[in-house]
Image (cartoon, rainbow, N blue to C red):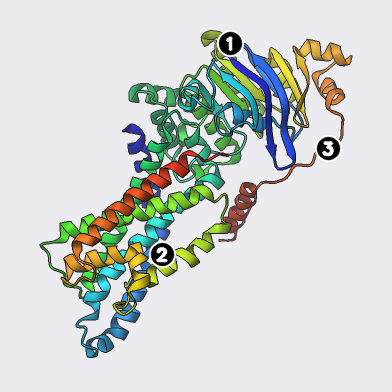
Amino acid sequence: MTTIYILWLRQLKRYVRSRPRIIASLGQPLMYLLALGFGFGPVFQKAGQGSYIQFLAPGMIGMTILFTSIFSGIELIFDRQFGFLKEMLVAPVPRLLIMVGRTVGGATTAVIQGIVVAVICLLAGFRPSIALIPVALVFMVLMAILFTALGTALASVLSDMQGFQMIINFLVMPMFFLSGALFPLNNVPGPMAIDPLSYGVDGLRSVLIGTSHFGVGIDLLVLTVLSALCMMVGARLFSRIQL
Amino acid sequence: MIRAEHLVKTYGDIRAVDDISFEVARGEIFAFLGPNGAGKTTTIKMLTTLLRPASGKVLIDGLDPVTHQNEVRRRFGIVFQDPSLDDELTAWENMDLHGALYGVPRRLRHERTEMLLRLFGLWERRKDPVKQFSGGMRRRLEIARGLLHTPKIIFLDEPTLGLDPQTRNQLWTHVKKLNEEEQVTVFLTTHYMEEADRVAQRIAVIDHGKIVAQGTPAELKQQTGSETLEQAFLALTGSAIREEGADSAEGLRNMARMWRRSR
């Protein structure tokens, strides 16, 4: 327990101290909210889809969690490059606990970021149903764990920064655009159905604005199963790291 | 306490460590000397569960690091050759995290952290993040951290690199004290021969992945007919300068340094 706690605390401290990173990571959702929200809003409404900001806000929360989580996981590459990974790997505690502590820490920061973006969305005119906010938090936590564990798994098999850009371009960006975070993808359900972020965004929409593509039960189930799977794979890959 | 039998580690065609065997007795100070790229750090990685040997066997306090990772990890402390601190955390936090990972009870952790930070002249700077530290201060913190829990074996991989004579003296005095009072086994590498001569009870010289000589400092000097250990070392390993491939980690650190400077 101490191991998990101390590594969770480390991730949190690193997060709180990197203010430039916090601000920078808020830039992206803000840009989408402003540019798309106000630009697309009227078109969206004319197409008979209702308020765009209502539709977009859950997508922005999901996007923020995706990026923050994956980055927290991938930060492991930095730990490797700057040497701190060695310190963790020779510690006399099961590597599983180290991985869990790191992941839970990274996921916590992602959820915090998600909440900050949710507040910004509220200021921009987002009006969700308040009763189900705790369920929305459950979705945020599940997404955060899933993507942090995924990032950790990937970082465990990459030895340097060369692969980082590849992951962003070929994994994170497609996941974001195919998730339906920005626009409804009802006509192209194929790619949407294999994108884990779709279920997170859809889950958030179903509890916050009451529209759903897959249904909230399916969303919850898929995310739970995938988080557990990513944790298992991530823990396994992490404990096999050699230096 | 430490036993290596026919240890081999290969990277592609390169045999970084090539069939080495040695033994370090309980309570002994053992120096592992060799030119750059001779295989010292690779050997230490295999002894400390960071790397699996390609073949051969290691026993740490009777336990195999491959099969009994956590038991082995509980028995040693290590000061790495390259940096292994968390730059974003303070000196105190780095120490505390280490103590928590090694299961040192909180009160003892705080006492020992204070003692060690004072010993290595870092107490006044304990609340500063490590990224503000100079190279020498980081090094001192790494050493203090490696000594925080009281292990049975301490691995010191070029611990004195870049340290001033005062700190070097402090370090060796402390290590010798641990060795005498608590029978801690010490396994060290260094490029300073007079240091090895002064501190180590036994020495192994490794070159091109093979052990070329083993014995007490006096035996090595006698064997090569030299007056100092430095001469003995050169007689054993030749005077050609070795090539050493920089790893990608070093490349990135350089990049990060440049980036930080340019801001």
Q: Which residue is the site of mark 3?
A: B241
Q: Residue at x 87, y 29 (%)?
A: B238
Chain of the residue on which disc 2 is drawn: A
Residue pointed to by mark 2? A24
Q: Amino acid at mark 1?
A: Arg
Vertical position of residue A127 compared to residue A163: above or below = below
Q: Comparing marks 2 and 3, which lies closer to the viewer?
A: 3
The residue pinned by badge 1 equals B26
In this picture, residue B205 sits left or right of residue A1: right
- Give the image location of residue B102, x and y in percent: 42, 27
Disc 3 is placed on an element classified as: loop
As measured in the structure, the alpha-carbon distance from the residue carrying label 3 to the one carrying label 1 is: 35 Å
- Residue B26 x, y percent position in the rendering: 58, 10
* Number of numbered callouts drawn: 3
Residue A64: horizontal and vertical position, in percent?
34, 63
Does A138 sit left or right of B15 as displayed? left
Marks 3 and 1 in Cβ contact (< 8 Å): no
Q: Identify the image quadrant of residue A92.
A: top left
Marks 2/1 in contact by CB < 8 Å: the verdict is no
Chain that bears disc 3: B
Instruction: Say which amino acid is labelled 2.
Output: Ala
Please give the label number shown on residue B1: none
In the rendered image, which quarter contains the N terminus of chain A? top left
